Amino acid sequence: MSRQKADLILVMVMAFWGSSYLFMKTGLESLGIYNLIALRFLLAFGITAVLFAGKLRRTDRRTLIYGMILGIVLLGVFVSIMEGMKSTSASKAGFLVSLTVVFVPLLSALFFRNKPEFKIIIGAAVSLLGIGLLTWNGRITPESGDLYCVLGAFFNALYILLAGRFTKQVNPVTLGIWQMGFTGVLALMIAWIVEGPQIPETTGSWISVLGLGIVCSAAGYMLQTIAQKYTSSAHAGLIFTLEPVFAAAFAFIFAGEILSVRGYLGAGLVMASILIMEVHFKEIHIPHFKVQKAVPLFQKAGEQKGERTHM
């Protein structure tokens, strides 16, 4: 798979995940955080385990260990995001979580000593400015929901880096299935302790669980895990900033959430950061035109070269 195709698949995954904020908002109306996470990921695990049963039979110990690690990190991602969504809008939460784009190169440089490309740094700075325009409320002290979403962005960046490393060492499909299984089981265990077992009570909640489980998790995480094997963690992190753009679009269409002019400007900057990352400036060639000295029309070709012509 080419890097461009992998990046395109990740963009499609961002559309799936952009819809997840509305699904989570609706699901939290009748379900606790851990119950919703458990239902989402256990459903996704069940679907993918059936579809790829043959691959699961060949699971090795390393894949299980990596799957457990990613499952723990994923749990941190969604607990943080859902706590944040209790006091913030779906569109705002989506853009805050896209701070992932800032954390990815920083964590990569800190833990793996990977020096980011200059355009990655510029793209991250542009994205950070865009997110600032989206979330600024005129006060210095951020809301608690905002802080939870930022924490979710940190866990998300950690997940991207770890997944980028792990998928190059084990089968990405098998790893993607097990990470969802571990996330669901861990969430279920905590749910039984702190919330008690719950099931959706409304049609909207059922739609949310099915959408989260089938579209956002089963399809989304499997495609993401496979595609990330063929692109860099820094590229994946910046493509992930498309997620809040889709989240804002879905929130506008289905929930009537409207951003301010400043907010839409911020969304535009986030999109610009993607272009900065994707465009290969060194590969853009500007054609050069050679200016030649004018030659009289009656001058023959041979004479033009200083040659004698023969009759």
Image (cartoon, rainbow, N blue to C red):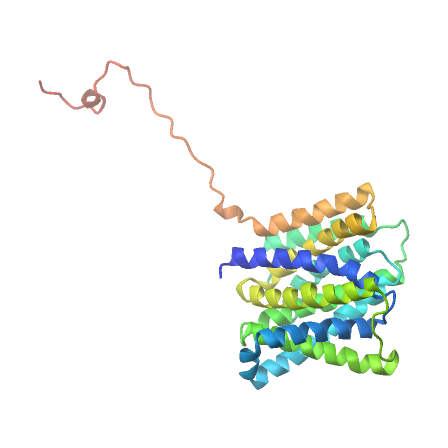
Q: Position of residue 220 (x, y in %)?
A: 65, 64
The single residue placed furthest to the bottom in the displayed view is 61
Residue 163 quadrant: bottom right
Say if residue 140 shows up in the picture: yes
> In this orientation, which residue lies closer to the viewer: 155 or 25?
25
Residue 34 shown left or right of residue 102 in the figure = right
Tell me residue 176's x, y (percent): 62, 73
Percent of width and height locating residue 140: 89, 54
Taking the image as shown, residue 292 lies to the left or right of residue 252, namely left
Query: Whole-percent x and y of residue 69?
Result: 67, 78
Does 277 sit above or below residue 60? above
Q: Is residue 241 visible?
A: no
The residue positioned 68% from the left and 59% from the top of the image is 16
| Residue found 53% across the figure and 79% down from its top | 54
Judge by depth and name the residue closer to the eye, 109 or 197: 197
Is residue 38 shown above or below 240?
below
- Give the vertical position of 301 relative to 210 (above or below): above
Instruction: Pick whichever, 83 or 208, lies toward us.
Output: 208
Question: For the point 33% across and 22% down, which residue is it?
Answer: 293
Quadrant of the rendered structure where residue 40 is?
bottom right
Q: Quadrant of the C terminus?
A: top left
